[in-house]
Amino acid sequence: MEKNTVNILLVEDNEVDVMDVKRTFKQAKVSNNIYVARDGIEALEKLRNDDVPSPRVVLMDINMPRLDGIECLQEIRKDKKLRGTVVFILTTSSADNDKIRAYEQNVAGYIVKKESGNSFLEVVTMLDRYWSIVELPCS
């Protein structure tokens, strides 16, 4: 089976978390391109301008300045061009309200960073396996 080449948009305002995610991808030998947006506004700009080529998957934090992850997700779902974008929430929030709001916007999954702890490598491996199996649209 040929592995899909998927571009990753990591939407994260914390530089340490960005470095941790990149390090874990490298450790898991996941070589997908990782693009970074520091908040929801920058993420929408990158997606709307096709700065992140398709097929793509978004890993998005919730707690960010200017436009938080849930608000960004709502904008993605309203946008005819972007509404089919695969989005995983990757956050420190384990609040049920945040989970409910995210799943109401059809996220592919909700991952709590602290709870994944040492198993974050397993999370990255799962994500890599996910996009190697599923068929993602190229536009």
Image (cartoon, rainbow, N blue to C red):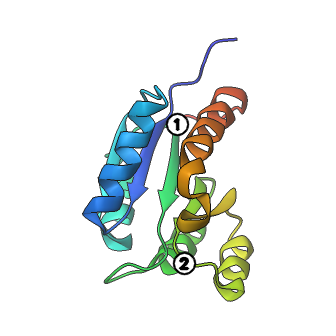
- Evaluate whether residue 61 shows in this view: yes
First-in-chain label (2 vs 1): 1
Q: Quadrant of residue 131?
A: top right
- The residue depicted at 66 percent of the width and 39 percent of the height is 126
- Evaluate whether residue 52 shows in this view: no
Mark 1 packing: few (<14 Cα in 10 Å), some, or many (20+)?
some
Name the foreground residue: 135 vs 18. Answer: 18
Position of 24 relative to 89 (above/below): above
Q: Give the numbered dot on residue 55.
A: 1
Name the foreground residue: 54 vs 98. Answer: 98
- The residue depicted at 68 percent of the width and 36 percent of the height is 130
Residue 67 horizontal/vertical position (percent)? 38, 81
Dividing the image into 4 quarters, which one contains the N terminus? top right
Between label 2 and label 1, give the one nearer the viewer. 2
The amino acid type of the residue labelled 2 equals Ile
**Is 95 placed left or right of 13 in the picture?**
right
Q: In 3D space, how far apart are the residues under numbered discs 2 and 1 (Cα atoms)?
A: 22 Å
**Is 57 placed left or right of 40 in the picture?**
right
**Is 3 placed left or right of 71 in the picture?**
right
Residue 50 horizontal/vertical position (percent)? 36, 46
Position of 27 relative to 69 (above/below): above
- The residue depicted at 63 percent of the width and 12 percent of the height is 2
Residue 36 horizontal/vertical position (percent)? 31, 53
The amino acid type of the residue labelled 1 equals Pro
Mark 2 packing: few (<14 Cα in 10 Å), some, or many (20+)?
many
Q: Quadrant of residue 18?
A: bottom left
Residue 54 horizontal/vertical position (percent)? 48, 37
The number of numbered discs placed on residues in the rendered structure image is: 2
Position of 67 relative to 83 (above/below): below
What residue sits right under mark 2 in the picture?
A: 70
Q: Give the numbered dot on residue 135.
A: none
- The residue depicted at 37 percent of the width and 62 percent of the height is 43
